[in-house]
Image (cartoon, rainbow, N blue to C red):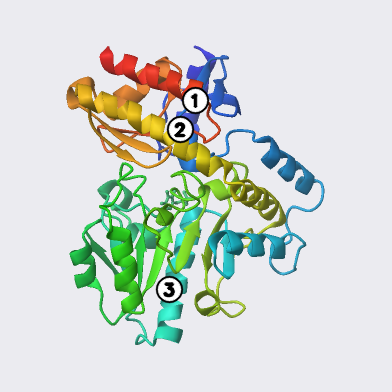
Amino acid sequence: MTATQRDIAAAEEHSAHTYHPLPVVVATASGAWMTDVEGRRYLDMLAGYSALNFGHGNRRLINAAQRQLERVTLTSRAFHHDRFAEFCAALAELCGMEMVLPMNTGAEAVETAVKTARKWGYRVKGVPDGRAKIVVADNNFHGRTTTIISFSTDPEARADYGPYTPGFEIVPYGDLAAMEAALDDDTVAVLLEPIQGEAGVLVPPPGYMAGVRRLTAERNILFIADEIQSGLGRTGRTFACEHEDVVPDMYVLGKALGGGVVPVSAVVSSRDVLGVYRPGEHGSTFGGNPLACAVALEVIAILRTGEFQARATELGEHLHHELGLLTGTGVVAAVRGRGLWAGVDIASEHGTGREISERLMERGVLVKDTHGSTIRIAPPLVISKEDLDWGLDQLRAVLAG
Ligand SMILES: *Cc1c(COP(=O)(O)O)cnc(C)c1O
């Protein structure tokens, strides 16, 4: 048995099978590259679903974490700590908003957005008690909690977890007329991904986000943008909403906010909205801890330079140009995305997304399939053009073979 086979067998024996990982066991990583337990190198073209936008072992982020590790790592919110105010102010400023409510994982932040919208609906908008409605899109992915999967349309994510949380209405993604029809006096919020990541990097039709912004503003409904995967540089902007000049009422952030070091998530909004909370009404033991704040502050400083947004734009144009050529040859049925982010539908005669992912792995490239015939390409934004081209060469070779 190889070291890889031993590790995989042990994982299968002692962990619940909620994932079906590619048969590679990573031991170390740097930048856009990972090395496995047998010394093989792989180009990371997934970047932890955008959690690793700034690359593995990013020096600035590791240094920030190490400095904070030596000072204080956790206080709980029972006490103040000296990185908290700085973090909240910096994140609010990055978002052009006023207040921040920090959490840890993306799902917790989405839960926080749901709770915030409901509380705002009752206390500010004046919706009758127990009637608050939140409109979401089909094929969404907002996390794995019981409430969040209650408004999923993915049978795998949802089956056998009922009874489900009421208070959500699901409309087709990208259909503005359906959205308008769903909005009523009890609607407190619309919750959307500006680009649907897990669904296969689905970009809505032009004007959709701006249309939802207009409809929600007219009706005093909060527009919540789940930018957990699309935000913080991936699409070439700090927020994917910017592509349509949309400013939502609330950003939900996660993944890259923790720099690939620690889980950090947050809801960011106005004083009118986040000001609804009183002490004891919501919280998290680890939310906004000193280590998380120190790392996230460095992430925010990196984003302020605009360097990674520019890289995502530039390399993204190149990526989409090259993938477009593959569409022309017919091996690729469709390509979607924005910036350094692409969903690639493989023509079915070339194999399933999983098979393509396995063949890419054998050639030293790691991607993740989704929904049968789609692979997702989202390398760390630190990737060099040469490495990106090499990765695309491997994809061409796999599709030619
Ligand atoms: C990953 C993701 C989440 C959930 O984040 P977790 O940290 O895994 O809980 C929510 N929304 C979107 C759009 C995501 O991509």
Distance CA(mark 3)–CA(mark 1): 42 Å
Residue 385 circle label? 1
- Left or right of 71 on screen, residue 369: left
Q: Quadrant of the C terminus?
A: top left
Name the residue tied to disc 3.
Answer: 117
Element assignment for label 3: helix
- Looking at the rendered structure, the kind of residue marked 3 is Ala
Q: Residue at x 50, y 46 (%)?
A: 233
Question: Mark 2 near mark 1, Cβ–Cβ under 8 Å?
Answer: yes
- Looking at the rendered structure, the kind of residue marked 2 is Leu
Identify which residue, 311 or 221, lies in the foreground: 311
Question: How far across and how far down the image is residue 145, in percent?
Answer: 42, 57
Name the residue tied to disc 2.
Answer: 315
Residue 108 circle label? none
Q: Under 8 Å from ligand 1: the CB of mark 2?
A: no
Distance CA(mark 3)–CA(mark 2): 37 Å
- Looking at the rendered structure, the kind of residue marked 1 is Lys
Element assignment for label 1: helix
- Left or right of 202 on screen, residue 52: right
Element assignment for label 2: helix
Q: Residue at x 45, y 79 (%)?
A: 120
- Name the front one of labels 3 and 1: 1
Q: To which quarter of the image does residue 391 belong?
A: top left
Q: To which quarter of the image does residue 187 belong?
A: bottom left
Q: Residue at x 38, y 68 (%)?
A: 223
Asked if residue 316 is positioned above or below residue 114 in the image, the reply reads above
Q: Is residue 75 visible?
A: yes
Asked if residue 60 is positioned above or below residue 166 in the image, the reply reads above
